[in-house]
Amino acid sequence: MMPFVARLANRIGCRSTVYLASTFTAVGLVGLATATSYWVLLAFLLLFGAAIATADVNMNLQGSLVERHHRKQMMSGFHGLFSVGNIFSAGTVSLLLWLGLNPVQSILVLALGLGVALLSLGRYMLPFAELEGAPAKTKPTKLVLLLGALCFIAFLVEGSMLDWSAVYLTSNRDMEPSIAGIGYAAFSVTMAAGRLLGDWIVSKLGSRAVLLAGSVLAMGGMALAVVIDHWVVSVLGFVLVGLGISNLVPIFCSTAGHQTVMPVAQALAIINAIGYLGILMGPAAIGFIAHATSLSFSLLFTSASLILVLCSAKIASYK
């Protein structure tokens, strides 16, 4: 899927691809809400997944192009607004349901909002797909593969918070299931805040220092959450994990945009493809390790993989 996304962006342009992907995302979202059979649901799931993947790659590509155009670090802020959008959309649907709309009506309102935003703001996107004089190399370089592997690790840690933080708080900290989501909520809000401040932080400290400090902070936060037996401390640890990993993926995407060996669209497509495996495979792997040992060990083991980011920070950063 990802190689096709890169070719599509190069053929019709980044802006047109975002328009197309966003349209199919809205259609897929409405289809998921109205599907009445297994096969129809499966078809709309495939459509929605393909559209989201296409939009994701092209949003990162657009961010890279805007960074080059303005000659400044901006990727962390873009990813921060992506996180804010997730929180906003979830809150909007919850509000609409509370006001009495049914799920289908709520999704229709959300899809309509996406269309309005796209039509009103989409014209400001840069139309071109690749920078002038871009390299023609299509095989993944060692740097691009490394960035993909590091994105895999970052998404693995993020996935562990998404799928296992609430389970950990209920099973290991005796928290009521009705409020156990506070751990992931705290993680998500902190990660969004860290990304919104990330461009300023990177401009002051440099991308390499942010990778080093972020990795140490995330590993320390996970250790704090697991070692000290109190739910408040565990939630605080999840906050530190969110702050620590908040700017890792944006920096990896910016580094891909600064490399000059292969086209940026293809590099970002490869990085996203490898990174997504961390979200897809990570939670299952964590569960397997937890079954063989314990959930505490599994979470610590997952965060320990950030040592690879520490060791690769010099190569994976940019100036």
Image (cartoon, rainbow, N blue to C red):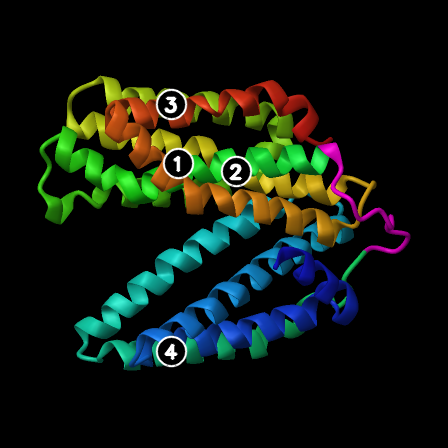
Q: Give the residue number, with chain letter if any, for mark 3.
A: 301
Q: Residues within 10 Å of mark 2 (few under 14, many from 20)?
A: many
Q: Mark 1 to mark 2: distance in Å?
A: 16 Å
Callout 1, which amino acid? Gly
Q: Residue at x 39, y 78 (%)?
A: 31
The mark that comes first in sequence, 1 or 2, is 2
Secondary structure beneath disc 2? helix
Say left or right for 21 vs 82.
Answer: right
The mark that comes first in sequence, 4 or 2, is 4
Callout 4, which amino acid? Val
The mark that comes first in sequence, 3 or 1, is 1
Q: Give the residue number, with chain letter if any, for mark 4.
A: 40
Q: Which mark is residue 152?
A: 2
Q: Residue at x 30, y 44 (%)?
A: 163
State which quarter of the image contains the N terminus. bottom right
Callout 3, which amino acid? Phe
Which callout, 3 or 1, points to the residue nearer the camera?
3
Q: Residue at x 32, y 28 (%)?
A: 289
Q: Which mark is residue 242?
A: 1
Q: Position of residue 283 (x, y in %)?
A: 35, 40
User: Is 181 included in the stretch rendered in magenta?
Assistant: no
Q: Residues within 10 Å of mark 1 (few under 14, many from 20)?
A: many
SS majority, magenta = loop
Secondary structure beneath disc 1? helix
